[in-house]
């Protein structure tokens, strides 16, 4: 395949980014709002309950996002197949992506059922461990969340089956049928994505565990700050998925120049969001934190003080965080997942976690010091991922051989 010239100007690229990105961002924010509602209610109910939910969610999201690696893997494969008008390949990888995602969900049941002893082994308070194991905890909030997640699943499945834009692809046709070639494709691309996500999410989960050693108020402040940042991060996740799809499409049609131009523009959008949110985190942290707490709660001053310091640190890593997630999306779009996996592991675990412990406990800086370690890990990840992507020859990247499409329609 030879690289094609970019036929789209910057304005056309930007329109395409927004047309795809705004619905994706909206869907992520809508899904995130379920957990946000839980956190708001638990914070007003009791700071101890909020702290327990932080532990529970730390474990749950590690498992959830690792399993999501297979869903992420489907995106570039479908994008490339769509660019070649290969409906059969689209159907094959979607079907096997669903199989692998379901399998990951089943495997995740064991650590969730053993949550309390796992939290105790991690040195967490016995009462917090018991409460966290009951959540998704504090059982009523957990049940409501599960029901709220099942509803969108049913609606999306119905939409994909019935909507004119997707009905012709028959993505759920012969869902029970194994397709070994597509299964291997999705698995090979997906497991490094899952482990890359594990490295990043594990860094924040390790931070939650370390802050849990400090105290309940500090852990509650960490949970509130993470909730605020997670809302912001949903914007970057949506843009990262745009980066994956657009890069996959450019790869499929051999458009090296378009791949580079689109990457520059989606990264520019993410950096603009990062700068705007950094200003908000620095100028109005206390009103944001107070939204999550009962004004009469005696722990409020301690939580607000710690949370304000954490959000100030968070403002420092907004650019690094947005850079690494967008660049990861671009690398996935060109099917480069294994080297980024190692870069993430080194950045977050060989450097970030030790730095968090050293700053939080070795230097005695407490929870803000632990978050300082997050800054170190994210900056290193952003820099190394950027080096990996931007050093490539885009004309050659667009000429990467595509999967065999000579198969019969399935």
Image (cartoon, rainbow, N blue to C red):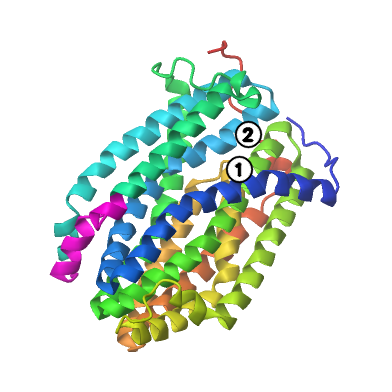
Task: Work out which quarter of the rendered image holds the N terminus and state it.
Answer: top right
Q: Quadrant of residue 199?
A: bottom left
**Near-viewer residue (109 or 54):** 54
223 on left or right of 115? right
Q: Is residue 128 above or below residue 331?
A: below
The disc, 1 or 2, on the residue closer to the chain's N-terminal end is 2
Q: Is residue 188 above or below residue 132?
A: above
Q: Is residue 113 above or below residue 264?
A: above
Q: Residue at x 49, y 33 (%)?
A: 155
Q: Which residue is mark 2?
A: 79
Instruction: Give the structural element (helix, strand or loop) at label 2.
Output: helix
Whether residue 265 is in magenta: the answer is no
* Residue at 40% from the left image edge and 65% from the top image edge: 40
Magenta residue span = 122-142
Horizontal and vertical percent position of residue 302: 34, 86
Residue 383 x, y percent position in the rendering: 58, 66
Q: Nearer the viewer, residue 281 or 72?
A: 281
Q: Circle 1 sits in a helix, a strand or a loop, which is it?
A: helix
Q: Residue furthest bottom?
A: 364
In the image, farthest residue toward the top: 408
């Amino acid at each position: 395949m030879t690289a094609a010239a970019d036929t789209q100007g910057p304005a056309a690229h930007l329109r395409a980014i927004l047309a795809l990105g705004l619905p994706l961002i909206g869907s992520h924010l809508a899904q995130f709002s379920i957990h946000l509602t839980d956190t708001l209610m638990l914070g007003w109910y009791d700071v101890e309950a909020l702290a327990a939910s932080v532990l529970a969610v730390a474990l749950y999201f590690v498992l959830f996002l690792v399993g999501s690696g297979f869903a992420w893997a489907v995106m570039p494969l479908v994008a490339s197949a769509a660019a070649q008008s290969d409906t059969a390949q689209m159907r094959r990888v979607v079907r096997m992506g669903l199989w692998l995602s379901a399998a990951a969900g089943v495997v995740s049941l064991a650590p969730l059922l053993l949550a309390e002893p796992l939290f105790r082994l991690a040195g967490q308070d016995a009462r917090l461990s018991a409460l966290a194991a009951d959540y998704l905890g504090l059982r009523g909030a957990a049940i409501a969340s599960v029901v709220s997640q099942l509803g969108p699943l049913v609606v999306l499945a119905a939409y994909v089956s019935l909507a004119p834009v997707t009905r012709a692809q028959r993505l759920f046709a012969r869902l029970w049928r194994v397709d070994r070639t597509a299964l291997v494709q999705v698995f090979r691309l997906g497991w490094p994505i899952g482990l890359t996500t594990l490295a990043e999410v594990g860094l924040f989960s390790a931070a939650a565990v370390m802050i849990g050693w400090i105290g309940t108020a500090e852990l509650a402040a960490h949970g509130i700050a993470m909730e605020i940042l997670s809302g912001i991060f949903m914007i970057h996740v949506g843009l990262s998925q745009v980066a994956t799809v657009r890069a996959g499409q450019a790869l499929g049609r051999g458009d090296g120049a378009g791949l580079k131009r689109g990457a520059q523009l989606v990264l520019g959008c993410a950096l603009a969001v990062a700068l705007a949110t950094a200003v908000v985190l620095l100028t109005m942290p206390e009103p944001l934190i107070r939204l999550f707490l009962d004004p009469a709660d005696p722990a409020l001053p301690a939580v607000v003080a710690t949370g304000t310091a954490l959000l100030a640190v968070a403002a420092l890593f907004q650019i690094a965080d947005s850079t690494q997630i967008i660049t990861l999306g671009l690398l996935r779009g060109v099917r480069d997942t294994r080297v980024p996996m190692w870069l993430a592991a080194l950045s977050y675990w060989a450097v970030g976690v030790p730095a968090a412990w050293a700053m939080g406990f070795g230097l005695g800086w407490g929870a803000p010091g632990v978050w300082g370690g997050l800054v170190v890990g994210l900056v290193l990840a952003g820099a190394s991922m950027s080096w990996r992507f931007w050093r490539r020859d885009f004309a050659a990247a667009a000429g990467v051989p595509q999967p065999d499409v000579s198969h019969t329609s399935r």
